[in-house]
Amino acid sequence: ILTSTGPRLALQPFEIPVSLDETEQYLVAVYPPLALDLSARTRQELTIMIEEDLEALWRNIVTADDTCLAPDARTLKEWLLARFGGDAHAA
């Protein structure tokens, strides 16, 4: 993901499964730990959408004060920090 302090690579790799919706001819990525449910016509479009969602999660969840976050959002914040490491305020 790209943050204001530069790119951040996953320290703990994870896979986001991609499947083909044969009826609509879309690639679909569903990943409940990140609340991702995306679809696109091409793998490149889907990759861009996933990257954009990860960047938004970092900006909106990881950099937020814990007291402002619901319990599920705090869990997501911990998940992201465990995978991408670093300072929660390095947006």
Image (cartoon, grey):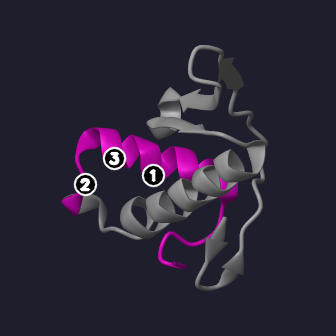
Q: Quick one: label 1 or label 2, which is nearer the N terminus?
A: 2
How busy is the neighbourhood of tag 2: few (under 14 within 10 Å), some, or many (20 plus)?
some
Answer yes or no: do the residues labelled 3 and 1 have beta carbons within 8 Å?
Answer: yes
Callout 1–callout 2 Cβ contact below 8 Å: yes
Instruction: Assess whether mark 2 and mark 3 are in contact (beta carbons under 8 angstroms).
Output: yes
Residue 12 visible? The answer is no
Identify the residue at image location x=20%, y=61%.
Answer: 68
Residue topped by disc 3: 73
Q: CA distance from mark 3 to mark 1?
A: 6 Å
The residue under the point 76% across, 43% down is: 43
Q: Main secondary structure of the magenta part?
A: helix
Image: magenta residue range: 68-91
Depth check: give the residue in front, 51 or 76: 51
Distance in Å between CA atoms under marks 1 and 2: 9 Å
Vertical order, 64 against 4 (above or below): above
Residue at the extreme top: 23
Q: Residue at x 57, y 72 (%)?
A: 87
Q: Nearer the viewer, residue 54 or 12?
A: 54
Q: CA distance from mark 3 to mark 2?
A: 6 Å
Q: Is residue 37 left or right of residue 41?
A: left
Mark 1 lies on residue: 77
Q: With 57 as the anchor, is 66 left or right in this view?
A: left
- Judge whether residue 79 is colored magenta: yes
